[in-house]
Amino acid sequence: AGFITALMKLLFKSHLHIRTFTGQVWATMKGKKASFYKLLDSFIANSSNLSLADSISQSKFINANLNLNKKVIGLKGGSLSGIDFKR
């Protein structure tokens, strides 16, 4: 879905595209399959105006493992379970 959205942004010259990372399928893969999915995530993130991850540790992991022209921003206090806005 993220790849199709990134393509549509380019095709229709949309001015705003926000990418959210909630997990990386390539993190446990190896070889060509992992490289392919990393390439897809890099394309999606590089074509977006803003890339967000649900935690700071996840944003560090993504920034270290993908070739991006802008950094993924981690949401403070976030987790896979969501963000506790009351906290």
Image (cartoon, grey):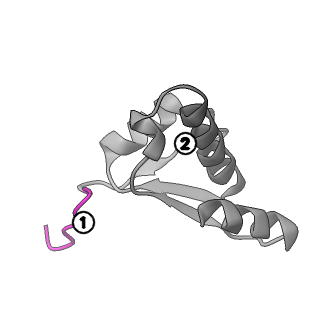
- The answer to whether 39 appears left or right of 9 in the picture is left
Residue sitting farthest toward the left: 87
* Residue 2 magenta: no
Q: Residues within 10 Å of mark 2 (few under 14, many from 20)?
A: some
Q: Which mark is residue 71?
A: 2
Figure quadrant of the C terminus = bottom left
**Count of marks placed on residues:** 2
Query: Residue 85: x and y, percent?
Result: 21, 72
Q: Which mark is residue 83?
A: 1
Q: Is tag 1's residue or tag 2's residue first in the polypeptide sequence?
A: 2
Please say if the residues under marks 1 and 2 sit with CB atoms less than 8 Å apart: no
Q: Nearer the viewer, residue 51 or 32?
A: 32
Q: In the image shown, does 51 or 28 lie closer to the viewer?
A: 28
Residue at 39% across / 51% down in the picture? Answer: 23
Residue 1, x across and y down, in percent: 60, 67
Q: Amino acid at mark 2?
A: Lys
Q: Which residues are magenta?
A: 78-87
Q: Is residue 75 left or right of residue 33?
A: left
Q: Amino acid at mark 1?
A: Ile
Could you tell me which residue is drawn at 55 percent across and 42 percent down? 71
User: On the rendered structure, is 13 left or right of 18?
Assistant: right
What's the residue at 47%, 56% (across, down)?
A: 52
Q: Main secondary structure of the magenta part?
A: loop
In percent of width and height, residue 29 lies at 45, 34
Query: In this rendering, is residue 51 above or below 10?
Result: above
